[in-house]
Image (cartoon, grey):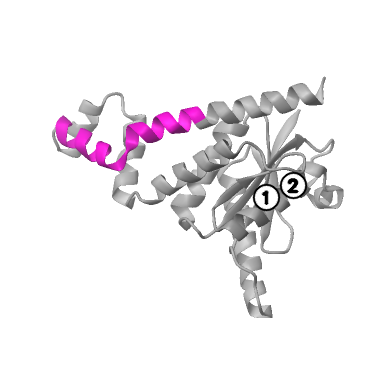
Amino acid sequence: MLAVYLTIDATNRQPSSFRKARLANEKGAELARILGDRFPEAHVLFNGTRFVRGWVEARHAPETLVGLLEYLVDAWGLGRFAVGLALGPIPSVPDTGTWLQRLSEPALQSMRACGLARDARVPLETAESGTEADPGVSAGLNLLLWLRSRWPAETRTVIERAERASTLRALAEELGISPPALTQRLGRAGWRPYRHARRRLIQQLERAVRRKRSRAGP
């Protein structure tokens, strides 16, 4: 099995004093708890610094990973975090108490990628086998997150309801507006291009996982 490793910088800045470091630690612990509750299929832990680390099993990775990043944008806003990603084997014993003592190459690469993301002032960067992975995936995910960050809370709520609605006409009736008005609202937010780009990026991530799995062998 393979995992997508995550390293999240909860502050996106270097604490310069004991108080800042303590606040960063508190934010990191809070973020690890929230992510662990919302994404139980992801193995998320906090290691006592401002970094949150973990992994998502490959069979869940693409959809869960994009959902996790979307949640970070919704909850924290763009530029408030940096994420490093890398593909690699899942620890043989997923014990969060000792995992950090057995940092594998992919986990180290995710730490490196997080540094690249922070230094480049972008929310996400990928790394694989000591080099940056497909830059198209990283650029596409960053563009997707940027677009999402521009949605007001009300627009985001309408979009989430549109994703669950049986038809847009039914949703328009629930909202008390005409179907053309709803279509126009969703169009201004870029909902359909966002959905299309999201599907394409998940497919790209799935291909990356398959490529890595084929290289790793049985």
Q: Position of residue 190 (x, y in %)?
A: 32, 38
Q: Secondary structure at mark 1?
A: helix
Q: Main secondary structure of the magenta part?
A: helix
Amino acid on which the number 1 mark rests in the picture: Ala
Q: Residues within 10 Å of mark 2 (few under 14, many from 20)?
A: many
CA separation in Å, label 2 and label 1: 6 Å
In the image, 89 versus 109, the foreground residue is 109
Quadrant of the rendered image containing residue 81: bottom right
Q: Which residues are magenta?
A: 179-200
Q: Secondary structure at mark 2?
A: helix
Give the residue number, with chain letter if any, for mark 1.
113
Please report the residue visible at 52 percent of the width from the left and 60 percent of the height from the top: 80
Decide whether residue 96 is among the magenta residues.
no
Q: In what quadrant of the picture does the C terminus appear?
A: top right
| Residue under the point 58% across and 57% down | 120
Q: Amino acid at mark 2?
A: Gln
| Residue contact between numbered discs 2 and 1, judged by CB atoms under 8 Å | yes
Residue 200: image location, x then y, percent: 49, 28
Q: Position of residue 117 (x, y in %)?
A: 61, 54
- The answer to which of 136 and 107 lies nearer the viewer is 136
Does 60 sit above or below residue 17?
Answer: above
